[in-house]
Image (spheres, helix red, strand yellow):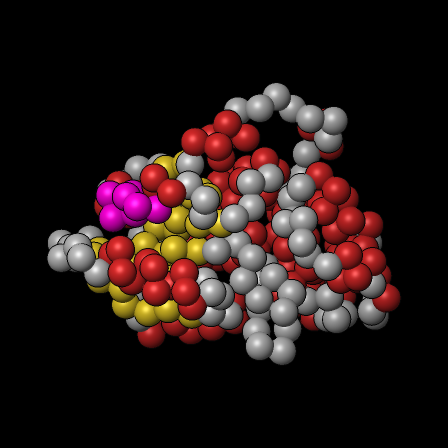
Amino acid sequence: MSDIIRVAILENHQGIIDGYQFRLGVSPDIQIVATATYGESLETMLAQFPADVLLLDVHVPTSSTNLNPYPILYLIPRLLETYPNLVILVISMHNQRKLIEAVMAAGASGYVLKDDQATIRDLVSVIRSVAGGGIHLSQSAYQQLTKGRDNYGDQALTLRQMEVLSLCAAYPDANTADLASKLFITNSTVRNRSAAIAKAHQVGLLPPDVPTSNLTELGGNET
């Protein structure tokens, strides 16, 4: 890694992007190389503007015409496979334990809550830390991770299941063949997606404000 830490941002609120630019712009060793407000722009952005650190919101709309959350849990492992030196720092308003666990299991180097004002004020130091191989969690995110197993602990989802659920939630109108093609799996693996995503919503793997209609309608587009 060079002396300059190149930062890319995926965040759908321009005001928050402006805040990051304000805080990071004072540091001579950090350069914001690109920003995006829709998930489907992310891979193209990283291909055009190589980055060392990606600031990633977990609940960004997929596109201007598809407002379902982009499948971050599906995407993180693939980004890290494509860009082995990329560091992903999630900054989110969501504090559900299952979601934090899933993001960290997928390969993120930190989970910062947007209401963690101390960390946001010290974002320059946090970026330097994770760029150097560190891990950073907001205190309340850390507390969530250290809580005891809940009633769903015996039925924990695998990372692969989390990827499938994340992708299904992002593309509720896609048929099983389309989803299977994205995942490089057989159609039967994603056929029971309505029940599976409802379970993920129930245990807190998906953010609570994902519209319920998106979950209950998933089973109606089978091929």
Q: Is residue 124 magenta?
A: yes
* 213 relative to 79 in the view: left or right: right
Instruction: Look at the image and give the residue range highlighted in magenta.
Output: 120-126
* 14 relative to 217 in the view: left or right: left
As drawn, the residue found furthest toward the top would be 148
Where is residue 147? Give x, y as percent. Answer: 58, 24
User: Where does the C terminus fall, quadrant-wise?
Assistant: bottom right
In the depicted structure, whether residue 150 falls above or below residue 85: above
Q: How many marks?
A: 0
**Residue beneath the point at 48% across and 32% down:** 140
Q: Please indicate, yes or no, whether residue 177 appears anywhere in the rendered image.
A: no
**Residue beneath the point at 82% across and 63% down:** 217
Q: Please indicate, yes or no, whether residue 117 appears anywhere in the rendered image.
A: yes
* 132 relative to 167 in the view: left or right: left
* 50 relative to 171 in the view: left or right: left
As drawn, the residue found furthest toward the right would be 220
Q: 44 or 183: nearer the eye? A: 44
In the depicted structure, whether residue 200 falls above or below residue 23: above
Give the main secondary structure, helix, strand or loop, of the magenta stretch: helix
Where is residue 66? Give x, y as percent. Answer: 64, 73
Residue 62 found in image quarter:
bottom right
Q: 72 or 97: nearer the eye? A: 97
**Residue beneath the point at 77% across and 57% down:** 212
Residue 81 found in image quarter:
bottom left
Residue 67 found in image quarter:
bottom right
**Residue beneath the point at 25% across and 56% down:** 24
Where is residue 139? Give x, y as percent. Answer: 43, 31
Where is residue 209? Give x, y as percent. Answer: 67, 54
Q: Is residue 154 magenta?
A: no
